[in-house]
């Protein structure tokens, strides 16, 4: 499964809400009404959540896969001694770049 678009902060929080409660969690309609419906619609269209009349909204396999991708995203660089982004000039802040291997 591929995440077609990035999640908004609200969409991420909705996905986290379901993921952290486990696979057996079902949100009743009465509770779902409290949440931003734009995010609910997005999650339903992406098949991250689905509705069962017997229990309410629940996280789908696609939703679990999307959450797993976000949960393990690595933001660390392979070589932190390489220059920072060209949009940030470290010397303007009286800092010196790291020496190779430091």
Image: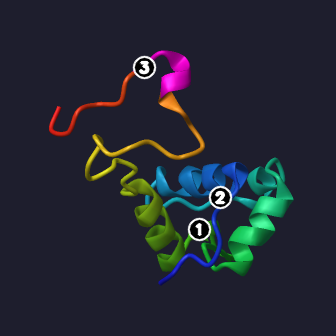
6 in relation to 36, above or below: below
Is residue 11 in the magenta section? no
Residue farthest along the bottom direction in this orientation: 1
Q: Main secondary structure of the magenta part?
A: helix
Query: Of callouts 3 and 1, which one flags the residue occurring earlier in the amino acid sequence?
Result: 1
Q: Residues within 10 Å of mark 3 (few under 14, many from 20)?
A: few
Element type at mark 1: strand
Identify the magenta region: 91-95
Which mark, residue 89? none
**Along the line of sight, which residue is nearer the eye, 99 or 33?**
99
Front position among marks 3 and 2: 3
Q: Callout 1: few (<14), some (14-19), or many (20+) C-alpha neighbours within 10 Å?
A: many
Name the residue beneath numbered marker 2.
27
Looking at the rendered structure, the secondary structure element under dot 2 is loop
CA gap between label 3 and label 1 equals: 49 Å
Q: Residue at x 56, y 37 (%)?
A: 88
Q: Position of residue 69 (x, y in %)?
A: 43, 65
Which residue is outermost to the left?
101
Which of labels 3 and 1 is toward the front? 3
The image position of residue 8, as x and y in percent, is 70, 56
Query: 10 Å neighbourhood of mark 2: few (<14), some, or many (≥20)?
Result: some
Cβ–Cβ under 8 Å for marks 1 and 2? yes
The number of numbered badges drawn on the structure is 3
Residue 43 screen position, x and y as percent? 69, 69
Q: Which residue is mark 3?
A: 95
């Amino acid at each position: 499964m591929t995440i077609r678009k990035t999640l908004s902060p609200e969409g991420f929080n909705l996905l986290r809400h379901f993921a952290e409660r486990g696979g057996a969690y079902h949100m009743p309609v009465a509770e779902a009404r409290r949440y931003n419906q734009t995010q609910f619609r997005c999650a339903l269209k992406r098949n991250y959540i689905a509705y069962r009349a017997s229990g309410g909204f629940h996280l789908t396999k696609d939703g679990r896969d999307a959450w797993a991708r976000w949960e393990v995203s690595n933001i660390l660089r392979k070589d932190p001694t390489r220059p920072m982004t060209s949009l940030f000039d470290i010397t303007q802040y009286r800092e010196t770049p790291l020496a190779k291997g430091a």
